[in-house]
């Protein structure tokens, strides 16, 4: 019997990846298992902290007296072997702590710390009462919120046996329950009693007959029994007293998906889809951890490929995990999976309440749900026996978490694919450069869907040169050709999607006459406007220059910040088109729960002619009546100070264009731009991903950017600018000493948005090809940062960052 537990403790200001040894008290010996959460005393003050059991043993190298585990929080392990191994791998690759990784994997409800209270066990002196219970007993006991003297005093009283700590372990009771009913006698016996009591108590007889035909091993909710047998709870209570039935606690799941969906069946695949499904199912059948890139133009029927591959995995008795960028933005995708697989589907997303999330997680944990759909964190769903993992729109940056652990869901998916010997399918019309480059190297098998599923033509894309429009009709958000096209659709009762790109809003200056954007002479990255210093800065290399008042390219004076708001655009549009009905979808109009779905539903029911929105509307929408897409400002993302600016622009324009003409009516797209000659815009017009890939790879090669180089970003932040800057200079010194000459170190520089939430940010970017010392050096930096962390300095390490802002 194990007497010692290895516990990873959660102490935010003193983290370590090494577990601590704790004694397992005899009364807990049969309870403690690896993968359970516990409460343990920590440090000299015996502060109570939470932790996770990662090992059990009966010897230890620790020769002092071990502290005992205080409480076990779980009745069953919350982490299985796979997820524990995954947490270790995640901690190493993302420079995060193991405990942080574990917490990221658990549903929110299990992350909350149990509420502790302290209460006297005997009569305390008036002085003790006044000191420790000024507002009466019991009191909340949160060691992190109380001052040290109070904690020490209370613990002293606890050791003297004068007070005790009680836990309000909410999550043990978090599963929602109801009363369940099961027959207690054989059907024959029940029928016999029913016959006997029929005359005297007809209601009881009815219940007995119902019980007699119930399957022996089944438990049915009391409410359901009452309804089906047509009896009151009183009748059931009597039957229980007489020993005809037994009552038990039955776990019920809150249904997170309220909308009913109409079931669908597998479609007949076109030849390209068939090839894709064949290749994927071969890997499923062969239990191969083979990875695929499904590169399919918008509307090519990638979803049908996913669904039929999932069906094959299920048929083999295995499970499926499907990741989507953001559930709220893709309700249509969730509905399509539900429509095919019904009750077997569990949906995990942040829009659910904590309780609903927990319910879905338990259904997965128990193996009741075999198809899991969810956004980024669903990649940690405790599904066993995976037969396939799918990642739709794999290029989306929301798959990368921008807080610790800074993981990319794609990397986790690939890890799990290896673990389960199952294929991972990455799908997109515009794959990330990293993924497409890996496919070129043969690491992924590329499956191409080159045509739309029902052979509809791709939409015709027009580029509108806004420099010309400005000369002809002055400063307006709507060009002449776009307005004409909108009017035509309104006359024909067809629908229109208009996108206003809000990304990079106002952070750069652009010439309205020639489209010129000021760039860094060293890095070829847009300079960012800093209003605090009234200057333009490169936040890669630190280059700084004055805000221009005259365009360096064409000498025009119309060089200024670029940007406008959706509300303003809506008002302008309403003036121009007084009879058109317009729905707006942006951060403001979607703040409330379910707002996305409501707006999309209204648009789907043709309650509006125009859907005007930010890049939220670019993804996944499949509305047959949309024949026109307008992009009001294609340039904002181009001006971002990020080496992925062109990639993002191309992806966004291609995705949003793909919303047009998806059914029988042909689609048309108008892209308004001040940079009509830019390759990202030109290639979005021809919707030529492959040419974009080749062009952009060339640019990346020239600039030594990923995927040719790996990148790590370090950030230091503090309320005082000097402290953040100094820390970053010290880090750079350590990097220069520890890394080889081949590593390129950019910075330190203040961040593009240097001051956020009253803190100053300084960053450095390391670009490298092979750097064996990188991990130990960064590990050292991380450890060293723990002490100053107590004084408000925070240092983050981001491997392969998605945002350089
Ligand atoms: P993508 O995800 O590649 O943009 P979708 O999966 O949304 O494309 O498919 C576009 C449309 O084509 C959908 O309405 C879908 O139902 C339809 N579709 C897909 N495959 C087939 C098929 N084999 N036969 C008929 N219609 C199909
Ligand atoms: Zn620069
Ligand atoms: Zn100019």
Image (cartoon, rainbow, N blue to C red):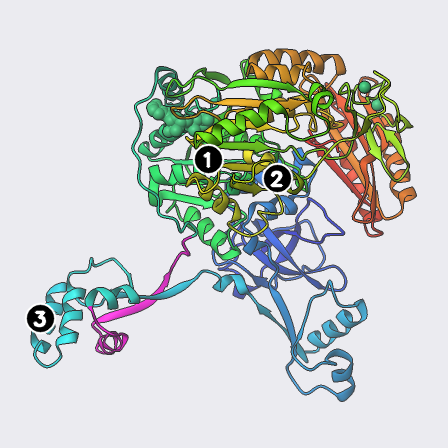
Name the spot of residue 571 as percent of width and height, x first: 63, 42
Residue in the image at 9% along x and 76% along y: 198
Does 244 lie within the magenta span?
yes
In the figure, 253 relative to 430: above or below? below
Q: Are marks 3 and 1 in contact (CB under 8 Å)?
A: no
Residue of label 3: 192
Going by the image, does 79 lie left or right of 714? left
Q: CA distance from mark 3 to mark 1?
A: 52 Å
Label 3, label 2: how many angstroms apart (C-alpha)?
80 Å
Q: Is residue 476 left or right of residue 374?
A: right
Q: Residue at x 51, y 46 (%)?
A: 349
Residue under the image location 21 percent in, 78 percent down: 242
Mark 3 / mark 2, whichever is N-terminal: 3
Q: Which residue is mark 2?
A: 575
Percent x, y for residue 378?
Answer: 51, 41
> Would you say residue 171 is visible in this rendering?
yes
Q: Which badge, 1 or 2, comes first in the chain's sequence?
A: 1
Q: Which label's residue is closer to the chain start, 3 or 1?
A: 3
Query: Which residue corresponds to mark 1?
Result: 322
Q: Secondary structure at mark 2?
A: helix
Mark nearest the camera among 3 and 2 is 2
Q: Quadrant of ligand 3?
A: top right
């Amino acid at each position: 019997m194990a007497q010692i537990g290895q516990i990873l403790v959660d102490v935010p200001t003193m983290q370590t990846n090494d577990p601590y040894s704790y004694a397992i008290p005899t009364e807990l010996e049969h309870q403690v298992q690896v993968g359970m959460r516990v409460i343990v005393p920590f440090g000299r003050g015996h502060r109570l902290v939470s932790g996770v059991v990662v090992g059990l043993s009966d010897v230890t190298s620790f020769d002092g007296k071990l502290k005992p585990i205080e409480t076990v929080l779980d009745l069953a392990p919350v982490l299985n072997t796979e997820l524990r191994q995954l947490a270790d791998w995640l901690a190493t690759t993302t420079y995060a702590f193991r405990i942080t990784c574990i917490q990221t994997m658990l549903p929110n409800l299990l992350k909350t710390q149990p509420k502790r209270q302290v209460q006297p066990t005997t009569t305390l002196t008036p002085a003790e009462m006044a000191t420790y219970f000024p507002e009466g007993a019991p009191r909340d006991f949160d060691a992190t919120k109380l001052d040290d003297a109070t904690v020490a005093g209370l613990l002293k009283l606890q050791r003297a046996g004068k007070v005790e700590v009680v836990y309000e372990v909410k999550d043990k009771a978090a599963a929602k329950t109801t009363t369940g009913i099961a027959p207690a006698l054989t059907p024959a016996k029940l029928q016999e009693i029913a016959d006997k009591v029929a005359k005297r108590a007809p209601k009881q007889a009815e219940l007995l007959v119902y019980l007699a035909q119930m399957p022996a091993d089944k438990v049915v909710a009391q409410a359901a029994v009452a309804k089906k047998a047509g009896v009151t709870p009183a009748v059931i209570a009597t039957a229980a007293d007489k020993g005809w039935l037994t009552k038990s606690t039955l776990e019920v799941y809150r249904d997170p998906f309220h909308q009913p969906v109409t079931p669908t069946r597998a479609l007949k695949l076109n030849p390209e889809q068939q090839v894709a499904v064949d290749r994927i199912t071969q890997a499923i059948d062969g239990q191969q951890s083979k990875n695929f890139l499904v590169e399919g133009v918008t509307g090519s029927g990638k979803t049908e490929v996913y669904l039929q591959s999932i069906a094959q995995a299920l048929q083999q008795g295995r499970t499926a995990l499907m990741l989507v960028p953001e559930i709220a933005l893709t309700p249509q995708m969730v509905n399509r999976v539900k429509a095919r697989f019904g009750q077997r589907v569990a949906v995990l997303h942040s829009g659910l309440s904590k309780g609903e999330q927990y319910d879905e997680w338990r259904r997965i944990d128990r193996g009741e749900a075999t198809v899991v759909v969810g956004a980024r964190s669903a990649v940690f769903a405790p599904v066993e026996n995976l037969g396939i993992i799918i990642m739709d729109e794999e290029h989306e940056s929301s798959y990368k978490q921008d807080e610790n652990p800074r993981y990319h869901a794609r990397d986790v998916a690939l890890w799990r694919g290896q673990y389960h010997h199952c294929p991972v399918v990455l799908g997109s019309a515009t794959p990330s450069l990293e993924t497409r480059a890996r496919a070129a190297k043969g690491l992924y098998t590329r499956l191409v869907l080159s045509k739309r599923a029902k052979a509809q033509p791709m939409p015709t894309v027009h580029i509108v040169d806004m420099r010309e429009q400005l000369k002809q009709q002055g400063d307006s958000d709507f060009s002449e050709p776009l307005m004409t096209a909108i009017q035509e659709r309104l006359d024909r009762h067809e629908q229109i999607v208009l996108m206003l790109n809000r990304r990079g809003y106002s952070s750069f200056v652009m010439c309205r006459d020639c489209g010129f954007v000021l760039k860094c002479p060293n890095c070829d990255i847009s300079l960012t406007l800093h209003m605090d210093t009234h200057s333009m800065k490169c936040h890669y290399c630190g280059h700084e220059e004055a805000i221009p008042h005259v365009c360096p390219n064409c000498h025009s004076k119309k060089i200024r910040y670029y940007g406008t708001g959706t509300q303003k655009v809506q008002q302008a549009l309403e003036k121009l088109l007084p009879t058109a009905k317009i729905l707006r979808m942006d951060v403001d109009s979607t703040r409330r729960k379910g707002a996305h779905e409501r707006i999309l539903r209204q648009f789907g029911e043709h309650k509006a002619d125009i859907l005007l929105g930010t890049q939220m509307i670019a993804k996944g929408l499949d509305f047959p009546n949309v024949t026109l897409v307008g992009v009001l400002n294609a340039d904002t993302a181009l001006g971002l100070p990020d080496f992925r600016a062109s990639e993002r622009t191309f992806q966004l324009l291609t995705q949003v264009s793909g919303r047009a003409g998806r059914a029988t009516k042909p689609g048309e797209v108008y892209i308004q731009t001040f940079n009509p000659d830019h390759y990202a815009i030109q290639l979005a017009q021809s919707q030529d991903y492959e040419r974009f890939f080749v062009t952009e790879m060339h640019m990346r090669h020239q600039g030594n950017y990923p995927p040719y180089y790996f990148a790590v970003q370090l950030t230091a932040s503090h309320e005082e600018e000097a402290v953040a800057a100094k820390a970053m200079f010290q880090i750079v010194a350590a990097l220069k000493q520890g890394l080889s000459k081949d590593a390129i170190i950019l910075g330190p520089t203040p961040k593009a948005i240097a001051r956020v939430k009253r803190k100053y940010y300084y960053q450095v970017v390391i670009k490298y090809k092979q750097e064996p010392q990188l991990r130990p050096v960064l590990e050292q930096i991380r450890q060293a940062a723990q002490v100053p962390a107590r004084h408000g300095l925070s240092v983050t390490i981001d491997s392969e960052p998605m945002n350089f802002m």
